[in-house]
Image (tube, rainbow, N blue to C red):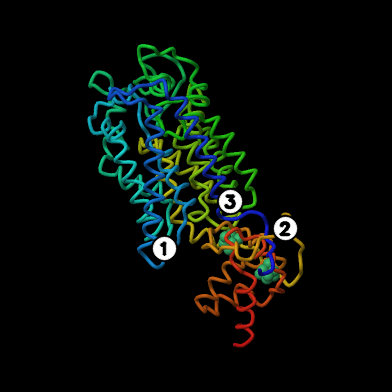
Amino acid sequence: MSKPKEYSSMTKDKLMTYTFIALLVLAIVSAVMWSSVTEPSGWNLGLSVAIISVIAVGISVGVDALLYKLTADSPLNTMSAAVFGLIVALSYSLGSPLMGQTEGSAVASSMLEPPSAFIYVALISLIGLVLFKKLLGKKVNPAAAAKFIVLLPFVSTVLLAKEHFADYMSGGLGVPKLAGPIGGGMEAINNNGLASFGTYLQQCYSFPDPTAMTYPDVNNIMMLEKYHGWVGGASSLAVIIVGVALFIVARRYIKWRITLTYFVSIAIMSVIMSTVYADADLITRLVFEVFIGSSIFLGFFMATDPATTPITYTGQIIFGVGLGVLTVLIQTYMNFFGGSILALIIMNLAVAKLDQVGKLKPTTDTKEPKLPKAKAFPAEKVKEYGCMKCGACMRVCCHNLSPILIKQAFDKQDFDALVKLHADYCTGCGHCTFICPSRIDLRKSVLQAKGALRGQ
Ligand code: SF4
Ligand code: SF4
């Protein structure tokens, strides 16, 4: 038997398993919370949450395994596929009885309610996994991009539903626009000449049976229990607790700075908008922007996807700020309340540029990074995965090098890049290999790159 190898205890599989457990907890919370509601189609809302979760995970894991069997270059990533599947399910909206009855659009109702919703979730899972995870190489968040593409033909009924903003007299819902003053009152006619925003939040997001509506406090709805929005955002409090717990467990590998800067920018933008439009009630705008289902779930579980977000800390902060500012602007000026998903896709496209910002300056001086405890793994159990772009290797290099970028440049035999990245400063400490959750032998690649540079 070969000698055990020492690494940090975190592996890519473990990270994916923790993320899957966190998402599963949220799926269970949403299913239990919504289990007392029956859709007009007769489907129980809690059961529907369970069914779309099983469909999305089943298709993602199944297709991942099939591609692994049928193609030579598609690795088997079961846990990663399962995580993707749950994100697809939790970022879908099943609507509610109120939504289905009053949306005024047969298309919207049929898309959002079971059993048609099952087909759309299956389609998003399939397109996301094959097109955005495998074929296009994770340039944009696969769940966000696939959902956007599938929903695009319904842009005027689901994404930018016109009837939201038409007044009651012409058969609309009378939802006040964010590009105007909003208030938290219960008056039917107020602000923007339509219903007050607080009324809208209560009618759409509180218990979905209009006859049983008790008009609880709007802040409680947005924070504790809301309907009609994304499945994963049913309880903002649950998302925060589960998300923060995951960040603590995997703090070296999860890009929590994006989440933090995203929500801080949304809060600042809400204050700015509130001032510009002289809101009667700043808190209503703030709770809507921060706790709307798409925003709270996306901020914790989609905006931090390592593969489609910047690798440097500065890049992550700019990404989070851009995401927050764009989300508020899209929601305010395009009347697209799920604006964060479009904002995420736009910011994903800027990641290649943001990866160049904030790289540490390589140095010949030696620094001693704080490393996690070592754990011995039998050599035959050490499995190498593709880089997940967590950036951990860049944070532990004694000479501020970027081991993964050096490896990529070396694999391409790009010697100009190797010179710029100062591969020759490497002293072979091995911290980068030790910390890597994908078990990539970075030390070996960087030393080979250094040797190749010397031979030039
Ligand atoms: S082996 Fe080289 S690249 Fe890796 S951490 Fe040590 S000095 Fe940096
Ligand atoms: S190579 Fe670096 S960025 Fe890639 S997974 Fe390993 S530690 Fe993370």
Q: In this view, does 417 lie above or below 264?
A: below
On-image quarter of the C terminus: bottom right
What is the spatial separation of the Cα atoms under label 2 and label 3, in whole angstroms? 16 Å
Q: Horizontal placement of 161 versus 395: left or right?
A: left
Q: Are marks 3 and 1 in contact (CB under 8 Å)?
A: no
What is the spatial separation of the Cα atoms under label 3 and label 1, in whole angstroms? 20 Å
The residue wearing badge 1 is: 74
Q: How crowded is mark 2: few (under 14 residues within 10 Å), some or many (20 or more)?
A: some
Residue 165, by quadrant, is top left
**Residue that appears at 70% across and 57% down:** 375
Q: Which of 35 and 335 is in front in this view?
A: 35
Task: Pick whichever of labels 3 and 1 is earlier in the sequence.
Answer: 3
Q: Is residue 412 above or below residue 455?
A: above
**Residue that appears at 52% across and 78% down:** 414
Which mark is on residue 195? none
On-image quarter of the N terminus: bottom right
| Residue type (three-letter) at the residue carrying disc 3 | Lys
SS of the residue under disc 2? strand
The picture places residue 448, in percent across and down from the top left corner, at 61, 79
The residue wearing badge 3 is: 14
The picture places residue 201, in percent across and down from the top left corner, at 42, 23
Residue 104, by quadrant, is top left
Q: Do the residues labelled 2 and 3 touch (CB within 8 Å)?
A: no
Residue 75, by quadrant, is bottom left
The picture places residue 72, in percent across and down from the top left corner, at 39, 68
SS of the residue under disc 3? helix
| Residue type (three-letter) at the residue carrying disc 1 | Ser
Q: Horizontal placement of 115 versus 347: left or right?
A: left
Task: Pick whichever of labels 2 and 3 is earlier in the sequence.
Answer: 3
**Residue that appears at 27% across and 30% down:** 109
Task: Pick whichever of labels 1 and 2 is earlier in the sequence.
Answer: 1
Which mark is on residue 374? 2
